[in-house]
Amino acid sequence: MTVPTRTRPPGLLVVPGSVVGDVLAAADSACRDLVARVYVDVARDQVVNPDSLFLRPDPSRRSRIIALPAWVPGEPPAVGLKWISSFPENLSRGLPRASALIVLNDPTTGHPTAVLEGARISACRTALSAVVGADTLRPGNRHADVLAVVGTGLIARTTVAALRRHGWTWSSLRVHDLDPQRARVFVDELAAGPPAGARVTGTVAAALDGADLVLFATTAVEPHVPAAEWFRPGALVLHLSLRDLTPAAMSGADHVVDQVTHALRERTSLGLAVDSGVVDPGGIVAVGSLLDGAPLPKPERTVIYSPFGLGSLDIALAQLVLERSRTAPGVVTVPDFAGA
Ligand SMILES: NC(=O)c1ccc[n+]([C@@H]2O[C@H](COP(=O)([O-])OP(=O)(O)OC[C@H]3O[C@@H](n4cnc5c(N)ncnc54)[C@H](O)[C@@H]3O)[C@@H](O)[C@H]2O)c1
């Protein structure tokens, strides 16, 4: 048997946040299309997307770090891991709640090829998952009478900005946050062109009243919306924060997710609603199936969209960013990362 000549693994690229942000902004449409394509691949079972692993160093605190590995088909396939921390107390330290890195691996050799700043990619794919969900569930109608936003951190800002960029409009905007100052800052940041009706509400109920498009992006760990009647019939609820709605609030609606088994884990509202018997797991639909031609929910029905957040989206977008940033200023190559 011939012994293969020993070769040196390629260097490791380090792509910092500023470069990631520039590429994502320049590739917005391509990123949206990629999110939709990955959802279809997920629905067709062509993606390897194991359960996310939650590390909670201290169960009495809300801090956690999540590992999301994935393998996504493509030319080349994208393979890697997102490692994302959520430390809600960071807000009082003046730091973002979430921080992340993404490792990409060579699909042939498994060698790590790149490390990318991951929080921007994560926020971008989350916002675009909301856009893809909204576009899919409300085809031909990118207008809301009333948009309600509950929770006004980074994800809400990124998502509202993405909805706007992708053609969504609304006649009025209601915003609620446990911290009213954050809600006011959020409304002020939209001052570049908010509708005249933008206002901060003192309660979640006041924000939801009459809203036909609702975005939840809180850090609630226990459900706090008590009843389905809080939603206008036929509302589209983008439940990105996953844990705001009690089983009673989840009942009677149609449910759409990114991947069914993922979305029922980790005490999500949908998981609790299934456990308590008010939602039939057999009726939950993956957004990728809808994109692939499955029948849409009826427009008069309230739809609650709960995308759990798939590592496959992060890894696919990271691969796109890497391909468009290899020679960008600011990208650092560690030529001999593995050592001789
Ligand atoms: N589904 C996904 O794919 C996905 C991806 C990324 C983040 N997320 C989730 O999105 C949520 C928001 O993330 P972020 O980075 O914007 O967080 P953030 O900490 O920046 O902001 C959260 C905001 O929600 C407010 N809030 C907390 N509880 C509330 C409540 N009960 N009612 C009203 N406001 C409340 C906080 O005051 C804060 O302003 C988190 O729960 C995060 O886990 C989901």
Image: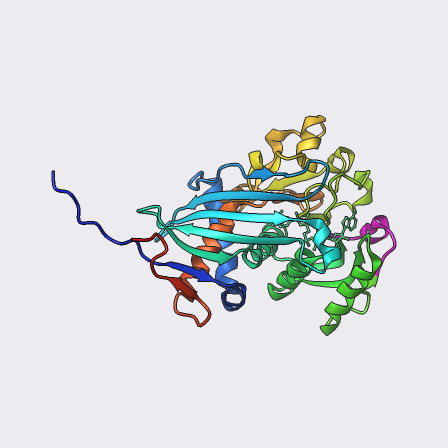
* Residue 336 horizontal/vertical position (percent): 34, 58
- Is residue 259 found left or right of 302 in the rendered image? left
* Residue 205 horizontal/vertical position (percent): 85, 48
Q: Is residue 216 shown to the viewer in this render? A: no
Question: Which residue lies most toward the left here?
Answer: 1
Q: Nearer the viewer, residue 57 or 166?
A: 57
Quadrant including the N terminus: top left
Q: Would you identify the image quadrant in which residue 263 lies?
A: top right
Write the residue at 75% across / 40% down.
Answer: 245
* Residue 59 horizontal/vertical position (percent): 69, 35
Residue 191 is inside the magenta segment? no
The stretch in magenta equals 200-213
Q: Nearer the viewer, residue 297 or 153?
A: 153
Question: Which residue lies most toward the front here?
Answer: 340
Q: Would you identify the image quadrant in which residue 287 lies?
A: top right
Q: Is residue 253 shown to the viewer in this render? A: yes
Count of marks placed on residues: 0
Residue 205 is inside the magenta segment? yes
Write the residue at 57% across / 59% down.
Answer: 120
